[in-house]
Image (cartoon, helix red, strand yellow):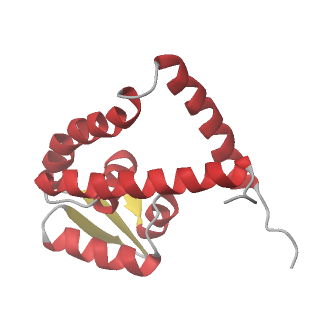
Amino acid sequence: MRNHTLGTLTWIRMMRFTTQSNQLSNEFLKRFDLTTAQFDVLIQIKTYAPITQCQLAEKVTVTQGGMSRMLARLEKEGLIERKQNWKTKTISLTSKGEQLIDAATPSQLHFQSSFFEEVLTAEEIKSLYIAMTKLEKHSREKKLPPV
């Protein structure tokens, strides 16, 4: 750790926080019989429906193969429906899926907010939000260095 820069140490902390937050969220969402990945997918479908599988894959952190398996599982559980419209297959929530995500969302958002609100001041949260917004924007535009 002696040779790490502050940037490297910050990245390590962010990775550890993300891992811990996801593990706790997965445990928390078990009460709704969901994982964080499923929660994210259902939120995206609710927000953008009808949505294609390709569009959905661009919005979440699930691989294409993982996405296919997850959608099959969510469809089998009656939470989503897929409709073929000529060459395009779209995905929407069923009423059961809508009820589940509407029940889970307030609890999950409160749980996630608590990570910040329990230890940071309002000003620190605002500063962190501004810094994370800059980092996210930069990461979308960043190019890999040449080999």
Q: Residue furthest right?
A: 146
Query: In this rendering, would 102 be left or right of 55?
Result: left
Q: Residue 108 versus residue 5: which sits nearer the camera? A: 5
Q: Residue furthest front?
A: 2
Q: Position of residue 139 (x, y in %)?
A: 69, 53
Q: Is residue 141 placed above or below 108 in the rendered structure?
A: below
From this viewpoint, is residue 49 visible?
no
Q: Residue 94 versus residue 114: which sits nearer the camera? A: 114
Q: In the image, what residue occupies the spot 23% across and 35% down? A: 106
| Quadrant position of the C terminus in the picture | bottom right
Q: Is residue 122 placed above or below 13 in the rendered structure?
A: above
Query: In this rendering, would 68 be left or right of 138?
Result: left
Q: Is residue 136 placed above or below 50 in the rendered structure?
A: above
Q: Position of residue 41 (x, y in %)?
A: 34, 58
Q: Position of residue 118 (x, y in %)?
A: 35, 28
Query: In this rendering, would 73 be left or right of 2?
Result: left
Q: Is residue 105 placed above or below 84 in the rendered structure?
A: above
Q: Quadrant of residue 53?
A: bottom left
